[in-house]
Amino acid sequence: MANAQSIILHQFERSPFSEKIRLALRMKNLGWAAVEIPSILPKPDLMPLTGGYRRTPVMQIGADIFCDTSIMLVELEKRFQIPALDLPGHEGLSRMVSAWTDGKWFQTSVAVIFGTIGEHMPQAFIDDRTKMSGRPFDIDAMKAAVPFMKDQWRSQLMWIEHRLAAARTAGTGDWLIGSKPGLVDVHAFMNPWFVEKNVPDFLATCFAAAPLSKDWYQRLKDFKGQAPEEIEGAAAIQIAHDSAPRLKPASTAGDIGDFQPGDRVAIAPDDYAKDWVEGDLVIANSERVIIARQDERADNLHIHFPRVGYVLRSA
Ligand SMILES: N[C@@H](CCC(=O)N[C@@H](CS)C(=O)NCC(=O)O)C(=O)O
């Protein structure tokens, strides 16, 4: 039974960012609970936990809420050290790689996928994404760009092929960095997975010219891990309500701005879905921001955000 110590992932099956965390959980062989959330607004059982952050996934451990996969991976490594994914050679580099996998490569995947299957998407999804991004989710434009985007997608896959081939020649192992899979592999896995789920023929075509990547991808898919316990959003909120956030000394010592613990602040992603979450500052440093919030249903929470990619301001 999920409890205050459980890792709870608020996610949906087809979400590539959720898959990134699910893969890390499988590789670490951790038990976890899943709350299936809607892929579009409204998300009535998520908002009490996040205070307005709407993206997918969100990780919860008791009354600590983690927004954004990059801070989830940091936290999983801190709390569950063995087997490690932040292996020698991956430190720091994995975040640099994720700036590409979650940014340019992900945008290329979106263009290929929705340019190919976009007409099957419900209008409510298109309207939601238009509102979220502040610009038209233009399926026709994506359709027109598919040939070019496929080309771009495959060329980025070939970076992985190149890395694997060089590692093989150097005899340093058959993962992206060294002889064990780690965070760099986790980040790089997400886009092939997203494409396979939606346009499998295209992935097969790309893999035909990238046999090392095909094999690498399959070896990552082979991690079995543990099946999650499925729980309802209301049960997750109750767990938060019945838990206390992990005690942390409030500090802004590692920050270069002039925020102080206890300041009323607001924080939002700097790319899209810029929904501000307001609360009292607990911690701000170069790694993360933690704000404290009170919610009628979930009671006292600490909400964690990565520092990179988020704007913090006084509220
Ligand atoms: N930087 C975020 C990106 C997450 C993201 O963009 N997720 C997509 C779904 S895979 C999303 O939030 N879509 C809108 C939604 O689910 O409401 C992270 O790493 O967690």
Image: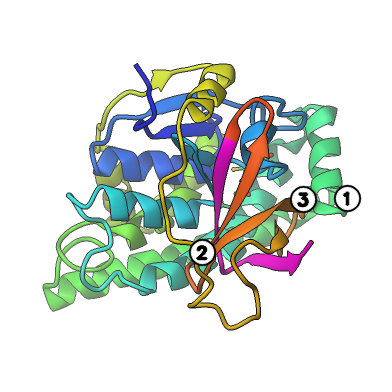
Q: Could you tell me residue 143's position as x and y percent? A: 77, 48
Q: Residue at x 17, y 50 (%)?
A: 82
Outermost residue to the bottom: 256
State the CA–CA distance, disc 3 to disc 1: 18 Å
Query: Of the residues shown, which amino acid type is indicated by label 3?
Result: Asp
Q: Out of 143 and 163, give the one closest to the viewer.
A: 163
Q: Which residue is mark 3?
A: 275
Q: Which residue is mark 2?
A: 288
Find numbered disc 2 in the image and state the secondary structure of the residue it sits on. Answer: strand
Q: Which numbered marker is on residue 240?
A: none
Q: Quadrant of the N terminus?
A: top left
Where residue 47 sits, quadrant-wise, is top right
Q: Out of 263 and 40, give the one closest to the viewer.
A: 263
Disc 1 versus disc 2: nearer the observer: 2
Residues in magenta, as a range: 300-315
Query: Of the residues shown, which amino acid type is indicated by label 2?
Result: Arg
Q: Residue at x 31, y 71 (%)?
A: 91
Q: Quadrant of the C terminus?
A: bottom right
**Mark 1 Cα shell of 10 Å, populated few (<14), some (14-19), many (≥20):** few
Taking the magenta stretch, the answer to whether it contains residue 201 is: no
Q: Kindly indicate whether the residue at mark 2 contacts the one at mark 1 (C-beta within 8 angstroms).
A: no
Where residue 183 sits, quadrant-wise, is bottom left
State the CA–CA distance, disc 3 to disc 2: 18 Å
